[in-house]
Every structure is written in C-alpha cells, then in structure tokens.
Image: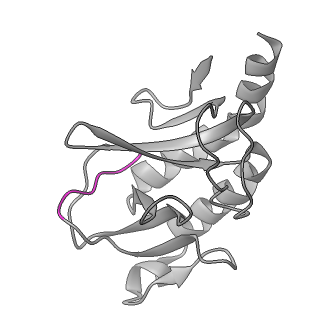
C-alpha cells in the first residue's frame, strides 16, 4: 500500500520492505514493515530514496517553510545545517544529474534543501530545489502525512 502525497510520486507514505535505512531527521534506524515517509528523486531512470519516520513530518515542514520565508538562506554561500545532526541541509546543488523530489528537474549550481542518509553505501542525497513552488509543494505534502498514515494503517 502506498499513498502518494505528490502527483509525481516523489513524496509518499508507505511501508519500508527492504534494508534498514535511517530516518533522515532522527538518524535512527527504521524498522522494516512499518509505515514511513519516503522521498524519491529519479535520475536517468534510477530511483534514489531516503526515508523519514512520520512523527518528524511537521518538524521538516517547519524547516522548509523557514527556508522559503527567510531571504538570508538565499544570500548564503555556505552549507547550512537545518537540524543538529546535519543530515538535512541547505546549500548549493552539485552534480549535473540531480533532480528535485517535487519538480523532477534541477540545475547544478542552484540551491536547495538536501535530505541525506549516510548509512546506505556511499550515502544517498535527494534534493528539494529552492523555489517557492518546490518548497511550498513539499511542505503541503508533509501536512498530509498524519491523514495518509491513518488511511494506510486502516487499510
């Protein structure tokens, strides 16, 4: 069962069936078979996914709103940690093959919010580009998490 929070399926509520990824917000392992929030970007036909426990959806939404409303982020040349452990950051997008979880396109050198899971191989980073549209859509999707979680658990 999957509930898509965006039309492009970039943010979903679903069960994690494989591996033991870490929550991008808490850094703690996510147990297989539990409902969580996934963030997926597609690069050259390959999907890259990071996971977050649903109880952190509101905190991440607040981070995205803060970035979207504060012009100081857009003027910074350095990477800014948005949460204490540094797995959610704001900064310049590197690599020509990056895409956005929301818009599915992005330009190298632009800025955005990255969600990272460093416990998987060399690590997985997915991006939300720094545009009013992308940040707002991601925040709206995160507002839906409690209802989507309840719907999934009731199925």
Looking at the image, residue 57 lies above or below residue 127: above
Residue 36 in percent (x, y) is at 69, 38
Q: Residue at x 75, y 53 (%)?
A: 56
- Magenta stretch, residue numbers: 96-103
Residue 154 in percent (x, y) is at 82, 13
- Res. 83 image quadrant: bottom right
Looking at the image, residue 76 lies above or below residue 149: below
Q: Residue at x 59, y 43 (%)?
A: 19
In the picture provided, is 140 more to the left or to the right than 57?
Answer: left
In the picture provided, is 71 more to the left or to the right than 145?
Answer: left
- Res. 128 image quadrant: bottom left
> Residue extending furthest bottom?
77
Q: Nearer the viewer, residue 75 or 5?
A: 5
Residue 115 in percent (x, y) is at 52, 61
How are the residues colored? Answer: one colour
Q: Residue at x 68, y 34 (%)?
A: 144
Q: Main secondary structure of the magenta part?
A: loop
- Res. 74 image quadrant: bottom left
Looking at the image, residue 81 lies above or below residue 65: below
Image quadrant containing the C terminus: top right
Looking at the image, residue 87 lies above or below residue 42: below
User: How many numbered marks are there?
Assistant: 0
Q: Residue at x 63, y 34 (%)?
A: 16
Residue 129 in percent (x, y) is at 37, 59
* Residue 102 in view in this figure: no
Q: Is residue 17 magenta?
A: no
């Amino acid at each position: 069962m999957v509930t898509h929070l965006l039309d492009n399926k970039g943010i979903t509520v679903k069960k994690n069936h494989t591996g033991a990824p870490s929550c991008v917000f808490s850094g703690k392992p996510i147990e297989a078979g539990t409902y969580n929030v996934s963030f997926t970007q597609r690069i050259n036909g390959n999907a890259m996914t990071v996971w977050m426990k649903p109880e952190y959806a509101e905190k991440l939404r607040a981070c995205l709103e803060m970035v979207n409303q504060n012009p100081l982020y857009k003027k910074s040349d350095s990477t800014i940690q948005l949460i204490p452990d540094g797995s959610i950051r704001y900064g310049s997008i590197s690599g020509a093959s990056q895409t956005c979880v929301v818009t599915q396109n992005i330009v190298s050198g632009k800025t955005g919010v990255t969600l990272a899971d460093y416990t998987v191989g060399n690590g997985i980073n997915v991006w939300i580009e720094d545009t009013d549209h992308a940040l707002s859509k991601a925040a709206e999707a995160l507002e839906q998490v409690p209802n989507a979680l309840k719907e999934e658990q009731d199925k």
